[in-house]
């Protein structure tokens, strides 16, 4: 099972495979992977992708096998994820709550899934600037890049 971050969906939708007749095969392929492997999009990712009125949120919602995961389902481990960011001010906590990253990691823990993100590791960053791969590493959560995910799945689902 895979939990997708906003960055992966944004990259696919806006840059790599914008919806068109030429790119429909990619989205059908991704939906087929979701059917067989499980692709989860956290509620917070839907909120984040819906901030720009470009149709991404509606498009992802239209794919029948991609599962939306309610925020409430990860709350039992959310504090553990937040603690991995280090010492945060009240203002930092409010800002962190508004982004999808910690929820992607928390859902990955809860579902025993792999987080998929376009974010690159940046181990020297601190606080809110920490990246999904680094938070995952600190919590022993499986993660992989969007590109690696596509490459690996290309070998499984043709």
Image: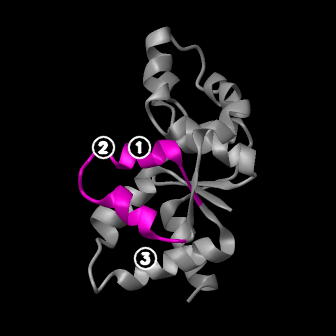
Look at mark 3 in the image and give the residue it sits on. 27
Quadrant containing the N terminus in the rendered view: bottom right
- The reply to whether callout 2 and callout 1 are in contact (CB within 8 Å) is yes
Q: CA distance from mark 2 to mark 3?
A: 21 Å
Q: Is residue 6 above or below residue 97?
A: below
Q: Is 110 placed left or right of 54 in the picture?
A: right
* Whole-percent x, y for residue 37 in the image: 67, 71
* Whole-percent x, y for residue 127 in the image: 51, 22
The number of numbered discs placed on residues in the rendered structure image is 3
**Residue mark closest to the camera, 3 vs 1:** 1
* Bounds of the magenta segment: 40-64
Q: Magenta includes 54?
A: yes
Q: Earlier in the sequence, mark 3 or mark 1?
A: 3
Tell me the residue at 66%/56% (across/down): 114
Tell me the residue at 41%/85% (across/down): 25
Dividing the picture into quadrants, the one containing residue 83 is: top right
Closest to the observer, 81 or 77: 77
Q: CA distance from mark 3 to mark 1?
A: 20 Å
Residue 119 seen anywhere in this rendered image of the structure: no
Look at mark 1 in the image and give the residue it sits on. 47
> In what element is the residue under mark 1?
helix
């Amino acid at each position: 099972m895979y939990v997708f971050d906003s960055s992966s969906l944004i990259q696919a939708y806006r840059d790599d495979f914008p919806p068109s007749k030429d790119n429909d095969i990619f989205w059908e392929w991704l939906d087929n992977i979701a059917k067989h492997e499980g692709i989860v999009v956290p509620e917070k990712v839907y909120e984040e992708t819906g901030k720009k009125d470009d149709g991404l949120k509606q498009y992802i919602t239209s794919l029948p096998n991609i599962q939306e995961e309610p925020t409430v389902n990860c709350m039992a481990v959310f504090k553990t994820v937040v603690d991995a960011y280090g010492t945060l001010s009240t203002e930092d906590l409010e800002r962190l709550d508004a982004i999808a990253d910690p929820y992607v990691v928390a859902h990955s823990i809860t579902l025993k899934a792999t987080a998929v993100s376009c974010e690159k590791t940046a181990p020297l960053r601190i606080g809110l600037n920490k990246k999904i791969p680094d938070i995952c590493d600190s919590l022993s959560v499986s993660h992989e890049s969007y590109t690696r995910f596509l490459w690996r799945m290309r070998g499984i689902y043709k």
